Amino acid sequence: MNDRHPDAEPSLPGVVSQSNKNADSLHLAAPAGLSRDEARRRLAQYGPNAIAGERRHPVLTMLSKFWAPVPWMLEATIVIELVLDKLLEAGIIAALLLFNAAVSALQEHRAQGALALLRQRLTVLARVQRDGQWQTIPAQELVPGDCIHLRVGDVIPADVRLATGQVSVDQSALTGESLPVEAAADAVIYAGTAIKRGEATGEVTATGARTTFGRTAELVRTARTSSHLEHIILQIVQYLVGLDGLLFLIVLGYALLRHISFVEILPFALVLLIASVPVALPATFALTTSLGAQELARHGILATRLSAIEEAAGMDVLCTDKTGTITQNRLAVESLKAYAPETEETLLRLASLACDEATQDPLDLAIVQAARERHLFPSDAQRLSFVPFDPGTKRAEAIARVNGQVLRVVKGAPQIIADLAGTDWSRLAGDVAALSAHGFRILAVAAGSEQALHLTGLIALHDAPRPDSRKLVQDLYDLGVRVLMVTGDREETARTIADDVGIGTRTCAPEELRASPQTAVEAYDVFAGVYPEDKIHLVQALQRNGHITGMTGDGVNDAPALKQAEVGIAVASATDVAKAASSLVLTAPGLSNIVAAVELSRRIYQRMLTYILNMSIKKIGLPLFLSLSLLLTGVFATNPRLMVLMLFANDVVTMSITTDQVSLLRTPQRWPIRSLILAAFSLASIALLLDFGVFWAGSTLIRLSLPQVQTFVFVWLVVSGQLTVYLVREPRAFWRSRPSRWLLLSSIAAIILVSLLAIQGWLMAAISPLLVAALLGVGLVYLLGADIVKVRLFHALRVR
């Protein structure tokens, strides 16, 4: 039995449905309101009608950026540099530390707008009755029990139970569903929604964080998603710190056995620390994602949280809303079922008589549009009277003069219209059920004289999928991303749309999702009739199951889940709140740009992977070389100044990896940290042998002085470090793909500059051009030999 108005949505928690009441019981007396004294007492009890926000001083936010493993290593380096009176080197490291902190703080600042926008939605004025007089006050001063009056265009400032009047409420900002909800006496309407039609008086039932809107705001405020990027950096640093700690303990033990003073060993500790700290790692990740954000912007995608660009590479589940995302958010006539002797043309013509575009009712607009497209709109008819849809009677009706005859036309809920027409419900129950099974919204139409009506037929309306939705779903499946539909709409409608676009038909009831979310998210494709808290719990269940989750949405109700998801995506038509809570915002209708975002993020992942491998090889091999060379020879293979120069020549210069050309990966990508470290250690071992070979050749074979040996080793470490980039950027042989222009130019520039410094003796002891050329030749041999090992190693460890 279809006794609901076709545009009615599933009720929000706490709604007293208008359709379940008898029309005679809906006229309640308007509340008397509160006295000023009582209002002040309740304001003290309940607090202001606003949403509390987390406030953190900008200075504390900035200081927090200096409290993490990488900053600790840099800070220790600065302290040792100052102790050794190396002010220039200390200043350089401090500048790098500040740069990393500033980039991180800027990223956080861009993502803090969601709660502020939610609070702004309540900074409106309200018409309230105090001490028996109507007055206008700031909505923040409303308290439970206040009597307020609402008119067309008002944003509802609190949850209100209506006492008198009748309104049409646009709940799209709160529920995400576009069709208005009719409300009359005893119905509850919600803060953050808007009056689209009508006028009413009611009593405030909840304010601030206790409103449905406020609870959604609290969910946004408390929603948290762990950054996989931060976790990756932490894991890498943990490996490096563990290795460095072990090496330092070994060297310290050696110093004690050899009776070397702490002052003498301190410079080595500094060199070891500089060699180990991944100084450019946070900045490189930030630069990579910033460049990715610029490229995304060219594809119509704005990134508000840069880490989401990297997260999208591993996204394996995308939860998408239905209305306005998969569908066009525009009702259209899908099917006409005329009953003899009437035809479909007559049915549509009569139905359009009982519509009025001035009401902006989506159902009326769809019927009028269909009639005009078929040239059936009765422009010559003279409408004598019109009564818009009334939730009490569940119908709209018109009286018109057509061809000289007075005609009465009614449209509305099928059972109501059948009763008015004196038609046995069983005659059309089967047709209504068949159309409802497809998720259509159904209206019945009857026409005749004012005394006698006959059933004309049924009209089925449908918010059709966007033309590109099916291809989008298939493209995401091809990229290894599973698509789920999550909507507040009815199960039948959601299932039909999901089936049309290829998502699937396995539909989960809200009760099952709430009872066993981690099981449900793996077993179903469609989640219908859900509330905001259900959406965030669904995302959390997917995350607990190990998925990197994307979430699309457009309404305030989607904001908590958008913030919770690793990749929150607001569609073009989304509210400001949804956009602020998201990490990616689409600027074009539909979701087609999501495919571009996934593809780009996987290319960014490849560039980051190249940087991590390159950096790990250096940060493992170099400390080992420096420590072992000291233990075996008793001298430092390099000095602190050369190590600082190496930070720029290798670590900073190789940030140009962020521009490299890479191929598209067809499956979601996760960081295989252990495999990366194992591969890096294996390749670092090869480089370590050559490091010792160069050190031995310079000190024993060529018989250079210690300062010249240090220069000789320095040039080699820069050359091998640059060539390592090309060794690891491609899982196949290194010559199989062409690097980007900027990467190639930066490597050439670094090698030329370091060679010039060494030959001229600037900032280091001079060595001959012939020795520099010899090191370049050794580097090419290293690249060719190590490449053979790398191909087999990457395949065995599945690094790429």
Image (cartoon, rainbow, N blue to C red):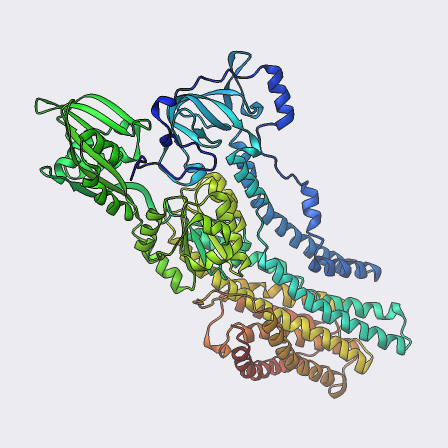
Judging depth in this view, the residue of 61 and 189 nearest the camera is: 189
In the image, what residue occupies the spot 76% across and 79% down? 628
Quadrant in the picture for residue 183: top left
Question: Relative to residue 77, is residue 259 depicted above or below?
Answer: below
In the image, what residue occupies the spot 84% across and 73% down? 252
Of all residues, the one furthest to the bottom in this rendering is 701
- Give the percent coordinates (x, y) of residue 212: 51, 35
In the image, what residue occupies the spot 50% across and 27% down? 157
Horizontally, residue 702 falls left or right of residue 419, namely: right
Question: Relative to residue 615, is residue 506 depicted above or below?
Answer: above
Of all residues, the one furthest to the top in this rendering is 132
User: Does residue 600 appear anywhere in the picture?
Assistant: yes
- Give the percent coordinates (x, y) of residue 551: 47, 51
- Quarter of the image with the N terminus is top left
Question: Relative to residue 527, is residue 647 depicted above or below?
Answer: below
Judging depth in this view, the residue of 182 and 18 nearest the camera is: 18
Horizontally, residue 543 falls left or right of residue 339, namely: right
Quadrant in the picture for residue 162: top left
In the image, what residue occupies the spot 57% across and 26% down? 140
- Give the percent coordinates (x, y) of residue 256: 89, 75
Judging depth in this view, the residue of 660 and 182 nearest the camera is: 182
Horizontally, residue 307 falls left or right of residue 689, namely: left
Number of numbered discs present? 0
Horizontally, residue 285 falls left or right of residue 496, namely: right
User: Does residue 292 appear anywhere in the picture?
Assistant: no
- Give the percent coordinates (x, y) of residue 341: 9, 37
